[in-house]
Image (cartoon, coloured by chain):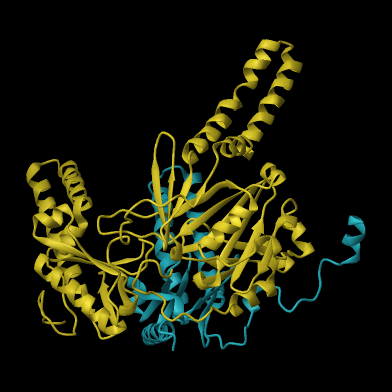
Chain colours: A yellow, B cyan
Amino acid sequence: MQPESEGASGSDWRRLHPLSPLLRAGRFGLIVLYALLEVAEELAGAEVAGGFFFAAAVAGALAYSWLAWRAAGYRIGPEELEIRGGVLQRFGRRVPLARIESVDVARPIFARMLGLADVRIEVVSQGASEAHLRYLSEARAEAVQAELVDARRAATGQPPAPNHLGPPTLSPPAPMLQVPTRELLVAYALTPIASFGAVASLLIFVIALISTKGGLVATGLSLIPLPAAALASAANIERFYGFRILDEGDALVIHRGLLNLQTQRIATGRVQAVRIDEPFLWRRFGRARLLVDVAGYRGASGETAARSAVLLPVGPPEVVAFLMAAIELKIDVPALGFEPVPDRARWRAPLRWKTYGLAQAAEHLVTRSGWVRRRTDIVPLAKLQSTRVTQGSWQRRLGLATLHLDTAGVQFAPRARHRDASQAAELAVATTLPPQPSEWPSNLSGHP
Amino acid sequence: MWTVRVFARPVARSLPTMDIRTFDAGATWQGIAPEARTVWRAGGLIGFGLVGLIGVAALLAGGAAVAASVWAATSLTATVNWWWMSERRYRAWGYAQREKDLLIRRGLLIRRLTVVPYGRMQFVDVRQGPIARRLGLADVELHSAAAATNATVPMLAEDDARRLADRLTALGEAHAAGI
């Protein structure tokens, strides 16, 4: 095994601090030890034997943590960062240096008490894909942070993203867009939940009237579904009251709320996918809702920016088109021709097969589904991370498959269901991505 | 009119491909290591076998004979089924390295095909469970910016796994830089 102790420099494997496995076990380990002590006392029936058992358990834990320390290590190579570890299940992770988004040094409370720190390497802005070097002494952690930043700069010629959300604006500009309250009230009284609640209460009223022949009882029963529906509508109205958007150049800032004022910031370059929701009653009046899925971002203090945001709670098609242009999505949805699914899909999805559609624009893939709430998902090819085709056993017999479009967003799962199997597979392998100069530029307003 | 359409077009037509597993894309497909079956079978033996032993122990201890024998019989069936299915699972896995992307196919009941372009790769994981390590096998996991990307090639021979991970890392770099 390598003879280096914690802190030896060089391009070879380096160790973490010896206390790391114990710290990582953390509270869980303490609970386990306590449980073992209880079990030992039960089994042995005598304090001495229980204590012996407990000592054996502690020795076992120490031995395991020594093994874990020996197995773990990290290495900063010329092109990549390599981390390895594991006693029973070994793992090795290789992160190309150019993919490192930011390097933070975090000091969780127990680590801080021991003078250790956690180097957090954010690889993907999703917040869930991070690599950790747990734990190093504080001095070493900061040295490694500096080293990684230098190495990344050497690998790409750019420093990693700064941990702030852009320069503050001097004076608040006039809002780019404002949703009238009347529109909001009418629209959210007509959502499917509200309309179904109204229909349900009417039905219950009629049934109760027929069966009990008592008007008062009927009225009382019919009022049961109303509160739930009314609450849902009221909650939405409260969320989007006074909705207005300010344009800050590389980001859109949303102010909304009645009781609970909220501000959301959406970096236009970070929009992964866009969804247009059109409930059936809204379609009659030409209204739609626009949502965006944004790759999450975790700043130094641990907050996460908007992940899935409503960009427009209700609005006519012109406003939807205007907003899509504002987030740099050059696509004209009403002009798209959606390909339907093959007829044989009726055997697999008899109620919904007619509502499925797929459209390929020059730089986007668009899927559509649903009637009660028609959902149109728009995925720019530049944000498409991977494609998957899945085929269940019924789909296999009918020659159908579902095409999944994976993006870095976490809220939507755009997919084209029950397409012709060969078409889906061809599309999955042939979707050519437009050339990108660099996948991860340093400024936050860039991709993804 | 609707009825006429149903009869005018037959449900089953000859299509280029119906089953995702047979989709070729003109690439050379490689399989995973044959020892994968051994790993899965050993895991199944340990898992189901241990569970079945509880039933046998209960039988011997004179407990509820019916319940215990049902338990033992079920786990025996499960072990045998797992043993037999390992062969089919092994054959269902395949991967193909194309010029710009990696294709992975898997699945028996639900057939899946994953396409990950090299330029979208974030990092590569190589994992080894304890049994796999003994037999010299490793799993290679490819991660993109999407959480849903599930691109794992399991149970490759260690050298193949390392070579694949190296190659993917290099290709990821090259494609990200726009070369």
A283 or B174: nearer the eye?
A283
B14 or A76: nearer the eye?
A76
> Which residue occupies the extreme left position in the image?
A48
User: Along the horizontal axis of the image, is B55 left or right of A65?
Assistant: right
Q: Position of residue B54 (x, y in %)?
A: 39, 52
Please, is residue B83 above or below residue A348 in the view? Answer: below
User: Along the horizontal axis of the image, is B105 left or right of A121?
Assistant: right
User: Along the horizontal axis of the image, is B77 left or right of A417?
Assistant: left
Residue A436 seen in render = yes
Q: Position of residue A70 (x, y in %)?
A: 17, 73
A438 or B91: nearer the eye?
A438
Q: Where is residue B88 in the image (x, y as percent from the top left)?
A: 56, 73
Question: Residue A7 appears in which quarter of the rendering?
Answer: bottom left
Residue A56 seen in render = no
Please, is residue A250 above or below residue A191 in the view? Answer: below
Question: Residue A55 appears in which quarter of the rendering?
Answer: bottom left
Question: Residue A87 appears in which quarter of the rendering?
Answer: bottom left
Quadrant of the image containing the C terminus of chain A = bottom left
| Residue at left offset 77%, top offset 57% | A346
Quadrant of the image containing the N terminus of chain A = bottom left
| Residue at left offset 48%, top offset 36% | A238
User: Along the horizontal axis of the image, is B157 left or right of A73?
Assistant: right
Please, is residue A79 above or below residue A398 in the view? Answer: below
Q: Position of residue A425 (x, y in %)?
A: 64, 75
Q: How many marks?
A: 0
